[in-house]
Image (cartoon, grey):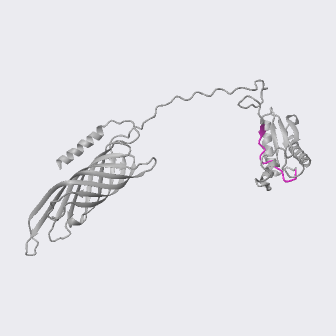
Amino acid sequence: MKKKILCLALFGAMGAAQAVMAQDYDDRWYIDGSAGMNFQANDRGNYNAPFGMFGVGKPISPNWSVELNFNYQDARENNPDTGMRWRQDGVSLDALYHFREEGRNWNPYLRMGLGWQRDEEEWQAFHSDHLHTPTPVFTNTNNSFAATFGVGLEAKYGRYGVRTELGARYDGDSSSIQSPNASYFLDLLASVGVTVALGPEPIKAVEPMQAPPPPPPPPEVKCPNVPAGVTVGPDGCPVPVTIDLRGVNFDFDKSKLRPEGIAILNEAIEVLKKYPQLQVEVAGHTDSIGTDAYNQKLSEHRAKAVYDYLTSNGVDAGRLIGPHGYGKTRPIAPNTTPDGKDNPEGRAQNRRTELNVQN
């Protein structure tokens, strides 16, 4: 037992002294402990017994870790008249493969291990007076090769981990007094446990900073003599600008402003007052129903309705160009569906007016 404690202390000291290195996974030493039930092999003739395991481990890659574990269990025979006890303790070196995914808290893992297991059988003979007065204790101790395999789930919470595991342990004991015909035993194990990482949090690897790409060259100016105050695009040439009158639409075959259109025109008036240098064209449009001549007149009436509203609410007529009507020549939505049927929604969008900025 003293040797076991000394080994654990040595591994713990190594974990506390390890330098923290920058990398993309947590490589800290950790201690692990678990408790569960050892479902005894049928050949043992014992009751199932609780067991405990304690050890130390270390990740060696993002998916692999190794552990040195110690186990102990003390099972009793299921025949109480003999008083048989079958203690086991052992040590194993285990490799764990973790199926980790980025952003997932619970991750499955596999355990594979090789080690040494000591089996200590202990029994008492009783007097025939049925008083169950014990005679001296008899023991049989065997040391044998052992192998473990298990599957489990582990959740990580910072330096702490929680595990649940199902597994099996092969015990090569072939010199049992209780089961003389057995050449080995296969016990099943179910357990829950915890892990605690040692030392400070690891420093994540930082990719070297790269120099920012050079800025793109300035666009070629194609229109160098544009007057001051005119809105230009990336190439330096004037671009048409429209004050958004989305919603200033008209009923079919009508040129009367609707209440919702008046509210939008009031917002446009505020924009024009804020920027007194702007000059705008008042343009009217229609949908596709009707003759070209009829729609031309209707679009002019709609443009005139907006023009009159602007001038009557403080916009200088000298800043307004038009009113102009464009009939059905400039739709912004399809008047018909792809199969040629009428598209009422598209026609409603085309029955509109616009304020097109001219400078």
Whether 238 is among the magenta residues is: no
x and y percentages locating residue 12 in the rendered image: 27, 43
Q: Position of residue 204 (x, y in %)?
A: 42, 38
User: Residue at the location (26% across, 40% down)?
Assistant: 13
- State the image coordinates of residue 242 (x, y, percent, origin top left): 78, 39
Q: Nearer the viewer, residue 169 or 280?
A: 169
Q: Nearer the viewer, residue 274 or 287?
A: 287
Q: Considering only vertical position in the picture, is 47 above or below 278?
A: below
Looking at the image, is 116 positioned above or below residue 187?
above
Query: Does the image show residue 46?
Result: no
The reply to whether residue 356 is visible in this rendering is yes
Give the answer, above or below, for where 181 lies relative to 157. Answer: below
Nearest the eye: 93 or 69 = 93
Identify the image quadrant of the C terminus.
top right
**Range drawn in magenta:** 241-254
Lateral position of residue 21 relative to residue 124, left or right? right
Task: Count the labels in the image.
Answer: 0
